[in-house]
Amino acid sequence: MSLLVVGLNHRTASTSLLERASVSPADTPKVLHDLVAAAHVAEAVVLSTCNRTEIYAEAETFHGGVADISDQISRICGIDLADLAAHLYVHHDARAVGHLFSVVCGLDSMLVGESQILGQVRGAFRASQDAGVAGGGLSALFQAALRVGKRAHSETSIDAAGASIVAVGVQLAAASLGILGEAPAAPVAAPGAATSGLGTGPEPVAPVEAPPLAGARVLLVGAGAVGSLAAQTVRRAGAAEVVIANRTPARAARVAEMHGGRVVGLTDLPHEITMADLVITSTGAAGLVVDHDAVAAALPGRGGRPLVFLDLALPHDIDPAVRDLPGVSLIDLEALRVALDGAQVAHDVEAVRSLVAAEVASFLDRRRAGRVAPTVVALRAHADAVVHGELARLRARMPDLDDREWDLVEGAVRRVVDKLLHAPTVRVQQLAGAPGGDSYAEALRELFDLPREVPAVVSAPDLDLVERS
């Protein structure tokens, strides 16, 4: 069996393509049943969010599984596979485990560290269970992934990473606008302030620091998770006006309602750029949302006011060439990574990556051991059947032995068999964690002519052990 994930996300596909690939909760059961009805897919989980659609599967063969899953995604999107292939990625076995663990921890999200994905993965797994298409392999994987996700969010501050990126971006934007840090040069006495007992005049009053974006007009382009967080951040930073533009007006309206703001259409962007002090983009579009010429056309109507772009999208929304325009500043994710280098957010991201690497190695060890365990159980069951048959024949030939004598004979035979099997069964379990470990179990099956079919009673205890770990 091959563990596979085939999908597309905000790094490989445009927002419009992701919308076409989206699988609603109502459609999920049919998609799952169509997948397992294919020739090579035995188990399946569909994870569909605003930033990704991924199908996880246990497949009979690698190439057959990839073909079946890719065909299913093609049908969901209504796009020929030849045109869709460039946007798809495939991960196999260890890389598939690492990918899911990174996803559930928020490392693969547009907003790094966001915790909403944990609930989305849990919901996807539950839907697969309800449809009866999550067997032992994917159940072990997703239960382990959910446990890793909980560890990441409870043992580190990865949840705050995305918020930190947006907050630092807003601070840098405010500094570029010349708003940050504007305060009276010297302490000013408040009217009617009391004087000191020494008669030296009014007590100085500490200046009240202005909010970083006090009085600023902010244009948000994109109303997803990042855009919503940006709206919240600029409001707290004192923005006087927040304008929201999004491809889906209803989503922009929700953000405006939550954080206060005015909704405009994407066709209004040229005018709104002319009016704005800060433009924050987070659309996830495949191409540029704001190009050099559009910004150049907006500058004459600005009266020389500085204009700052904060590009939080991946791939970027803003043409890098706007940096060359007079009075225009551009802050992108690369600049934010430099600003955050060595900060707590970078530390937490690295801590989660280390956690994921360790958990992937541990899971793969358990998975390999789980594959060997049925062979070990089958070998011992085979040996027990041989011993039982030989003892029955011996008892028939030696009817005069009393119970005490028979117990001694039976015990001796069983001890001999147990000792002969002990070394190979222990060793094959130890070797299972090494590269090519499955080959040792295969050798045992060939040498002892063990059946290929693994009864449920053989595999179930090992799956339970994996799920509880």
Image (cartoon, rainbow, N blue to C red):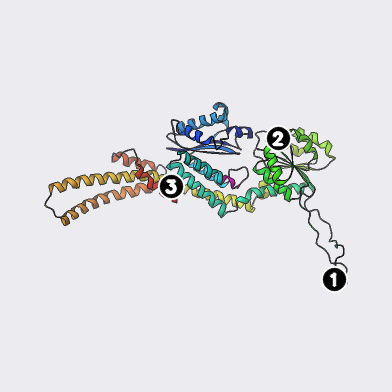
Give the main secondary structure, helix, strand or loop, of the magenta stretch: loop
Residue pointed to by mark 2: 289
Residue visible at 54% across and 29% down? Answer: 75
Residue beneath disc 1: 196
Q: Amino acid at mark 1?
A: Ser
CB under 8 Å between callouts 1 and 2?
no
Q: Quadrant of the N terminus?
A: top left
Nearer-N-terminus badge (3/2): 2
| Part of the protein shown in magenta | 106-117
**Residue 382: where, in percent of width, then height?**
27, 43
Q: Is residue 109 visible?
A: yes
- Circle 3 sits on which residue? 365
Q: Quadrant of residue 48?
A: top right
Q: Between residues 447 and 15, which one lies in front from this camera angle?
A: 15
Say which quarter of the image contains residue 12: top right
Between the C-alphas of marks 1 and 2, the distance is 59 Å
Residue most extreme to the front: 26
Describe the element under mark 3 as helix, strand or loop: helix
Indicate whether 421 appears above or below 8: below
